[in-house]
Amino acid sequence: MSVRGPREGFVESVITNISLIRRRIRVPHLWVENHEIGKLTRTTVSIVYIKGLATERVLGELRERIDRIKIDGILESGQLEDFIEDTPYTLFPLLLRTERPDVVCGSLLEGRVAVLINGTPHALILPAELTMFLQAPDDYYEKVPIGSFIRILRWASALLAIMLPAFYVAVTNFHPELIPVDLALRISGTREGAPFPLIVEVLGLGLLFEILREAGLRLPAAIGPAISIVGGLVVGEAAIRAGLVSPAVVIVVALTAIAGFGIPVFSAAIAFRLLQFTYTLLGAAFGLLGVQFALLLTVVHLCSLRSFGVPYLTPLAPFIVRDIKDHMIRNWWWGLDTRPKLIGYREPKRQPPGQMPSPGPGEKSGEGGEEK
Amino acid sequence: MNPPKERIANRQLFYFLFMMRTIIVMGTLPVLTAADALQDAWISSILSFFTAAILVVMIGALSIRFPDLTVVQYSQKLLGAWGGRIFSLLFILNYLHIASTDVRVYAEAIITGFLPNTPLIFIISVMVVVAGLAAHAGVEVIGRAADLLFPFFVLMIVLALIFPLPGGRFLLANLEPIMSRGVAPVLRGALVPTLIIAQYLSLLMLTPTTTQPVKALKTALYALAASSLVLTLVAGSVIVMLGPDRGSRSTFPFFAMVRTLQISECVERVEILTVFSWGFGLFIGCLPAGGHLGPVSGSRAQYLSPADRAHHGDLCGARYAVLSGHVANSDLLQPSGYSTHPDLCYRRSHGNPVAGLPVSTFAGEGIG
C-alpha cells in the first residue's frame, strides 16, 4: 500500500504483468526472455530488463542459475528465489519481492532485472540491497524532506526492532549506571514482586506477540481486529494487573513490535524481528558486551552477503559517495542524475544535470536561476 | 560469483590503519602512561608522528616496489626460498603478538570498567571469534565492515572531545609549564607510540590487495597523520580535563576522562557506549585480532606451496589453529590482577547518587 502512487498491482497472469510493465516503459529496449521451468507445470518464467542498461554479467548469471533448476513444478516466486539466491544461509532476503509495477519499472530504470513467474503476482527484483527493503515507493513520490524523514525513521525503527529489548535487558541487568537514577528507581519499582526473571518476561512477551501477529494475519479482515483487541488490550492489561509481567517490559515489547512494522517489506521485517531474539538472549547473558558481539556478528554477516555479485550493504559498505543521494535520504529528482554505480554502470547518466527549477531571471535578473 | 582476487580500496586500507593505531594509542595513551612526559604528552604525540613516519616509510617502501606480492612472496624472491620463509615467519609471529596484545587491552578495559566479574578469556574469545569469522569471510568483507563502522568510531572520538567543551570542566593551566624539564621526558614519551607502529607491518600483507598498491604508502602516511592528530587531541584533552598526574596514573586515561563527563541531567556515565564503539574500532583495527589471520593464513598458503593457493578449505583449519593460539597467547601475556587499578573502580563514582546506593542493588543482581 502507499499513500501516493499508482494503485495498480500485478495479477497472476504473466502476460498481463508484462503488459503492465510495457505500458510504463514504452521502448523496444525492454526485453523479455521467457524460460520454462518445471517438468510437470511448465511454468513460464520471464526475465525482464532494459537491453543495454542491465549488466550482462548479472543477466548471464541469472540465466545460468535459472537453467540449472530441475524441479517438477514452480508455483510461486519464493520457490524460484530459493534456487537462485546467492546463499541460502541467511535470514535476510537477497531478492526483492514486489507486487507493484511501478517498483519493478523503477528498478528496471536503474539497471536491475526483474523476474516474473506465471501464476503469482509477486515479481522478483535483483540485484537487491538492504536499502531497498527499507524504502517504499512513497519516498520517491512525496516531497524530498518528507520522504527523507520517513526513510530515516525507517532505519531507526529497524535498529529499534533489533536492539531495543536486548538493550533494555542488558542495561537493567548489567549496567544500571547508564540509566538516570529516577528512571532506574521507577523501573525497579515496577519490577517489585515480579514472579519471572526479566529475560523470561521479554522473550515470552516477544514470542506471544509473534503468535498474535500470525493469528491475526490469517483471519478474515472482519475478525482480525478482534484478535488484536483481545490479545493486545485484554490479555496485556490483565497480565499487568495480575502482576505477571511488569509494565516496562510490555512497553518495550510493544515498541519493538511497532518498530518492526515500520519496515515496509515483510521478508526483511521478519528477519529483523527474528534477530531481536538472538540479541535479547546475548544481551541477557553478557550485557552490552553480548549486544556488541551480536552487532559485530550481524555486521560481518551483512558485509559478506552479496546479491548477484553486488555487496548487500552497498552504498554504505563499500561506501559509494555518488549513491548516498538515494539512500537514507534522497535527493530531488533533478539531482538523481546517476544510476547506482555497481548496477547501472553501463549507462551511468540518467539525465542531464542542471535541471534544478528556478523562477527564472524575471525583473531582478542576476539573482539565482540557472538559465543562461 | 566472487571476483577472482579480493581487492580493498585504498580508502578501506586507510580505515584499517587509522583504527588499528588509534584504538591502541587512544586506549592506553602511551605518551602519558608509559613515560614521564606528563603535561608535555601532547608534544610527544606530535613528535611520535615524525618518528613513526620514518618507520612507516621503511615498512612501506619495499612493499610498493612489489605491488603484486606480499612480504612472504617477495622475501622469497630477495632472500631465496628458505631465507625468505624464515624471514616472513618473523612477521607472522609479530602479527600474532600484536593481535593478542590488542585484544588483551580491550578485554582489560571492559573488565576494569564494566564487567569486573566476567572471565578475561570470555571477553577475549568473543572478540577473537567475531574477528576470526570476519577473517574467514575475507579481506573484502573486513573492508566493508570498516566502511560501515568507521563513522561510528569517528563519531565516538569527536563526541568525547566536544562534550567537555560546554561544561567548561577543563583547566588550561594543566598544560603548563611547557617543556619545563627539558626535552628528554618528551622524547621518552614518544618512544612507545613509535614502537607500536609495528602494527603497520600489516601493510606488508595488505598492500597487494589494494586497488592502487603503489599509493599504499601514501595511504599509510595519511592514516598515521590522522591517528597522530587524534592522539594529540586525546592526550591534550586528558591532561586538560584530568590533570597530568591523575592522567598518567590511570590505566586507561581516555575512559577515565570520558567517565567524568556528564552531558546533561539525565545523560551521564556514557563511557560504556564509548568503550563499545571503541570495541567496534578495535574489531576493525584489530585486523591484528582476526583480520591479520586472513593475511596470515593466506601467507601460510604461500608459504607451503606458492604455486597452488586455491585450496581455501584447508586454510580454515590453519586460521582456527592460529585463533586458539591467540587466546592462549593473550591469556599468558599478563598475569591477572593487573586490572584492579584503584583509579578505575568505576563504581566508586564521585558525587554520583547511584554510588551511594548499596552495591548489591545495582552491581550484583541488577535491578531487572
Image: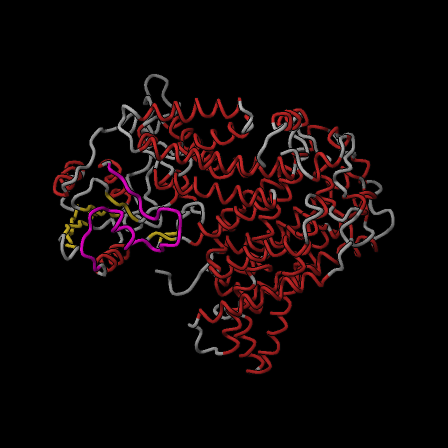
Question: Which residue in the rendered view is the most extreme toward the right?
Answer: B181
Magenta region includes residue A239: no
Question: Which residue is at the front of the view, B75 or B297?
Answer: B297
Q: Position of residue B47 (x, y in %)?
A: 73, 53
Kindly report the secondary structure that dominates the magenta region of the rendered protein.
loop
Residue A169 as seen in the image, left or right of residue A222 = right
Q: Which residues are magenta?
A: A70-99
Residue A122 sits above or below residue A245 on the image: below
Question: Which residue is at the front of the view, A328 or B187?
Answer: A328
Q: Image point 62% across, 76% down: which residue?
A: B87
Q: Position of residue A370 (x, y in %)?
A: 34, 29
Q: Quadrant of the N terminus of chain B?
A: bottom left
Magenta region includes residue A91: yes
Question: Which residue in the rendered view is the most extreme toward the top?
Answer: A363
Residue A177 as seen in the image, left or right of residue B286 = right
Residue A167 as seen in the image, left or right of residue A11 = right
Q: Position of residue A297 (x, y in %)?
A: 51, 50
Q: Quadrant of residue B122?
A: bottom right
Q: Image point 13% across, 53% down: which residue?
A: A42
Q: Image point 26% across, 37% down: which residue?
A: A103
Residue B270 as seen in the image, left or right of residue A353 = right
Q: Image point 83% across, 40% down: which residue?
A: B176
Q: How many marks?
A: 0
